[in-house]
Amino acid sequence: MDDLEQKLSLPFLPLRDVVIFPHMVVPLFVGRAKSVNGLSAAMNLDKKVFLVTQRDASVDSLEEKDLYKTGTIGTVLQLLRLPDGTVKALVEGKKRARMNRFVSKDNYYIAEVEEIVEPETSSIEREAMTRTVVGAFEEYSKVNKNISKDVIKNVSNITDLSQLADTVSAHFNFKLPDKQELLKTVSPVDRMSLLFNLMETEIEIYKTEQRVKGRVKKQMEKTQRDYYLNEQMRAIQKEMGGKDDHKTELEELEKRIKRKRMSKEATAKVKQEFKKLKLMAPMSAEGTVVRNYIEWLITLPWFVRSKLRLDVDRAEEILEEDHYGLEKPKERILEYLAVLKLVKKVHGPILCFVGPPGVGKTSLARSVARATGREFIRLSLGGVRDEAEIRGHRRTYIGAMPGKIIQSLKKSKVQNPVFCLDEVDKMSMDFRGDPSSALLEVLDPEQNYAFGDHYLDVDYNLSEILFITTANNLHGIPAPLQDRMEVIQLPGYTEYEKLQIALGFLVPKQIKRNGLSDETFAITENALQMIIRRYTREAGVRNLEREIASVCRKVAREVIKEDGKDFVKVSAQSIQKLLGVPRFRYGQLEEEHEIGLATGMAWTQVGGELLSIETVVLPGKGKLTVTGKLGDVMQESAQAALSYVRSRAGTLGLEKHFYKKVDIHVHVPEGATPKDGPSAGITMATSIISALIKKPIRRDLAMTGEITLRGRILPIGGLKEKILAAHRGGISQLVIPKENKKDLKEIPAKILKRFEVVIADHMDEVLTRAIVLEDGEELFKSEDKEVISPEMIPKAEEAVNPMQIN
């Protein structure tokens, strides 16, 4: 504990934003009445005053909690009254003191204080700390030129450690809490240590400030120098009779504006902006913004069009050259060309190609451009979440630009290209806007003749553009946007179509890409068929192309390795050696008919898939368990199927209350894959009935259809993809809903020939085909004819919304 001298009662002066150390002479301007009176009282006594800092400089009516405890006893050297009523006082700090009590008299403040006695320090510590602090102070004086050599000399001559610390502290612009901490620290050694840490931080900050100022000054000097030199060059050119660059640029720009044919609105806007530009300084930021705006308007293809190829026969040849199959989209493009040839002017159609990945949606759009003689633009919308990507930014923003639609048209240099908006179902939205809503105007033939881009601020005609959008499914496209487009479904390819595409397109392309030729490489149809069946399982041909490329690369390596090898022929037998173990089974059905195992057909985004559904019956209390990561609709289908089975219990030879004694578990394998939709209803019902009556289901039969409580079978979607999946899986019999019979026209005849297709309207017809019975055995029992009447069961199929049918 520090030794304390006698107690003193002194007038005290509260200080704002300043800390006065001992040995420090400071001029103060005092305005508060009590403070002025306190100084006057000190002058009348022994000129001593207690100087203490306020915690908050904004407080006028002081209390003890508003003041720091540690301050400085000082002497008033001079007092000068100013005309405005304030007082200028010159005070000198003498000793540290601690305030014990604070008294506010009517005229001035009085404090009871105790002088603080500082402890002695050893000579070694004193010498070490002196050298450290004086060295740091000299380093600071090198970066801060405001400190004179006399000050450095005076500091160096101080031998008292406490005085040295206080004197050096007074020359630094530390924060108020840091200064107060220095004043509060009694031990000179501790104070010197704290001072050194603060000095190091301050020196580093000062150096950083100097570096930043230097960079800014250098940049400003360069800008001013460039401006000065440019002005000099202009002046010299004028003197020599030369032309002013800025004036020449404006003249050239004016000529371009006069030559450019634009809409009336755009012409008026450009002329108005050009008048502004002529009045602006050439180097001004606003001038650059206006100049860029004019450039955008005069470089857009307002009335520049591609010369259309209206030869329908030639267009058909080009489409057939580029793509195999895809009859519907080709037919629609040829219809458009035929109408255009007759009418001469027609709004560009807005088509939406929807299909699995790899079926050729984007490449078909490119082919359409080639067939019609138009330029092709592709804009990928996958992941776009900002409305400004479509409409652009307003010119008030720094770095504003038109939207991608206008930017793409500038690149194409024509007003009537084929514009492919790729992955339109992958757009998203956030706080920056909804790009799909912005597309409503772009893709509406009744509105897009006057498309408003935020940057251009004038209407632009998009009606002559042939817009083609692509998507993997319609679920991700908002209904209003779907309504503006003509949707054309591109289903998956059949095995035969894949083989023809591989022979006609993929193999020649990969032969050329991998440095081979027809003289050095050949692949048989059987080999391609094996790749299609055993190494790929997709609706498109993207993976097929990868596998063919892999074969070509391995053959290329073999050709390089064995120089003497002139020709390599890849057969079905050598495929496994080149591509490894087959990845998929093809046409491998169950070895025997199984009880409770039914095969369904499902539609996915990448085509159709076969779906196995297993059911087991366990002793229990009537619980139905459904597993396999099934969605709500599919779980409800399982419940509907069980309700149908319960309603037909007697007919099927089951006890009336059989369900009270057993638990039924329905499982759909590949449990990590989410599954949903009502089309597995009849498959689930067949699987449950098979497990209950202990009769097997045909292993080569697949089925699809939604079931009602009365056993009626409702139509489903995606029939072509499902039948293609059954074809790949080696199925020989199909059961489909009666209302889907019309959709069989879309299935290639070569595929249908391989199936025995059963058209079913009721669940009884499905069971008759699916359940395997022994000779003379009957499936339905006659004694349950009156178990339940049709009038007692509501017509469930009448409540089905056709929009929800999967």
Image (spheres, rainbow, N blue to C red):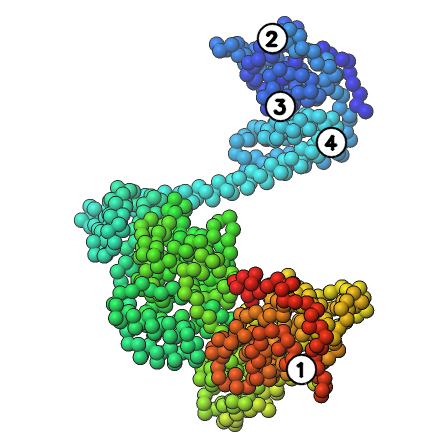
- Residue at 29% in and 70% down: 339
Q: Nearer the viewer, residue 505 or 537?
A: 537
Query: Label 1: few (<14), some or many (≥20) within 10 Å?
Result: many
Query: Label 4: few (<14), some or many (≥20) within 10 Å?
Result: many
- Residue at 62% in and 77% down: 765
State the CA–CA distance, disc 1 to disc 3. Answer: 91 Å
Does the rendering let one see residue 247?
yes
Give left or right: position of 357 versus 404. Answer: right
Count of marks placed on residues: 4
In contact (CB < 8 Å): disc 1 and disc 3: no
| Label ID, residue 56 | 3
Q: Position of residue 535 (x, y in %)?
A: 59, 81
Q: What residue type is labelled 3?
A: Asp
| Label ID, residue 37 | 2
**Which residue occupies the extreme left position in the image?**
241
In contact (CB < 8 Å): disc 2 and disc 4: no
Q: Position of residue 168 (x, y in %)?
A: 63, 29
Q: Which amino acid does label 1 sit on?
A: Arg
Mark 3 element type = loop
Q: In this view, does 623 lie above or below 566?
A: above
In contact (CB < 8 Å): disc 2 and disc 1: no
Q: Position of residue 2 (x, y in %)?
A: 79, 23
Q: What residue type is labelled 4?
A: Val
Q: Image quadrant of residue 218?
A: top left
Q: Image quadrant of residue 416?
A: bottom left
Residue under label 1, please give it: 698
In contact (CB < 8 Å): disc 4 and disc 3: no
Q: Image quadrant of residue 605?
A: bottom right
Mark 1 element type = loop
State the CA–CA distance, disc 2 to disc 3. Answer: 22 Å
